[in-house]
Image: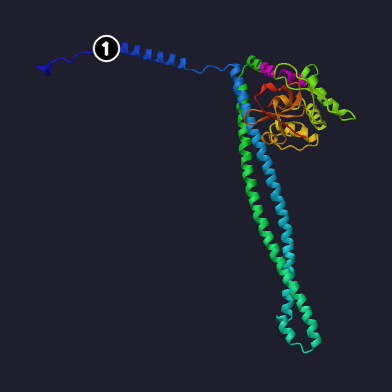
Amino acid sequence: MAAHRKPRQSPLGGQAGRTAATLALASAATATLFEGSGHAEPRPTTAQVKEKVDRLYEEAEVATERYNGAKEKAGEARAAFERLRDEAARRTQRLNTARDGLGAMAAAQYRSGGLDPAVQLALTSNPDQYLERAALAERAGDRQAAAVSAVRRELAAVRQLRAESTGHLDALREHETELRRQKAAVLGKLQAARTLLARLTAEERARYEAAEAGRDGSGSSGSSGSSGSSGSSAGNSATGGTGTASGAPATARADRSSGGDRAPVTAPNGRAAEAVSFARAQLGKPYVWGATGPSAYDCSGLTQAAWRAAGVSLPRTTYTQINAGRRVSRSQLAPGDLIFFYSGISHVGLYIGGGQMIHAPRPGAPVRVAPIDEMPFAGATRVG
């Protein structure tokens, strides 16, 4: 009986089932659409882009200083390698000369029959000739012994020089590898910053540039002369005094960390004022990473060039320049001091008084006057 029963029909069979399935698919598609819309990443604001770009520029500057350090070490290793190679060539020439001398002695002995000098003397019947030849043979033996010693010394020296050259060559290759790595890091950070800025609309780019100008407000005026601001006036007076015949240091104002001007201070010496004067003459020149002038600079390249113009040699990087003089506190700042920023000591500027500095900020921003408050202060050093 059960085998003859009709199969039970689904309550949604036929046209009703197909309609329900269509509605279910449409509901699922709609839900997916709204879910995707709800999770779409919002377009970053101008402020967010600026924050990311600033961070990329800071990271690029860290890589730039590492690049500068690797380049300096590679240059030192190359110079040492070439010096040792030249010395090895000179020693090799002396070695060959000493060997030629020994060869001449050996040839002379062969022509004389190869007899030991003592045997030849024993065969001499004339006593006078015996004594004369004995003296000559002794001197010849001394010369031969000295020649052998000279060959041994030169040979040992050449071997040592070649070993040292190999060590310096290995170091050079390591520094060059690090150089390429840091260069790639710099270029990658800068390209990422350019990509972010390229996504901005014309209006957003205008807001971004306005924000940059606001951050470097005194710097914008400083790069075109900056004679109107009180800080720049103080900075100008800090350099003007060195042009006098007496060479008396000029006067400037110290940092205004408490909100009000401190008592006037003078540059520590004429060389400090000369460094500031040089830096001021570079205003408006472009920032180029790894550059040391005269047409472009990075931050440590500018401070190095400024103090070089004053007769003081500074190391190349920010993290070595900070140890190139005597540390001073923020309240003791005077014109010519080096001011360092960020926890990694990745940026440096030259203090000019009035709470301001001259620095090479970043790509796209020329050498300018700017307040030292625009970046996190990490320390200061007085050189010269």
Residue 327, x across and y down, in percent:
70, 32
Say whether residue 232 is visible. yes
Q: Which residue is outermost to the right? A: 245
Closer to the camera, 21 or 353?
353
Q: Residue at x 12, y 16 (%)?
A: 4
Q: Position of residue 77 (x, y in %)?
A: 68, 46
Residue 212: say if magenta.
yes
Q: Name the residue nearer the viewer: 143 or 169.
A: 143
Please name the amino acid that badge 1 sits on: Gly
Quarter of the image for residue 47 reads: top right
State yes or no: residue 303 in magenta.
no
Q: Vertically, is 60 above or below 100?
A: above
The boundaries of the magenta stretch are 209-223
Residue 366 visible in image:
no
In this picture, residue 66 sits left or right of residue 221: left
- Judging by the rendered image, the residue that carries numbered circle 1 is 14
In the rendered view, tell whether residue 19 sits above or below residue 183: above
Spot the residue most to the left: 1
Name the foreground residue: 29 vs 15: 29
Picture coordinates of residue 34 (x, y %)? Answer: 44, 13
Q: Quadrant of the C terminus?
A: top right
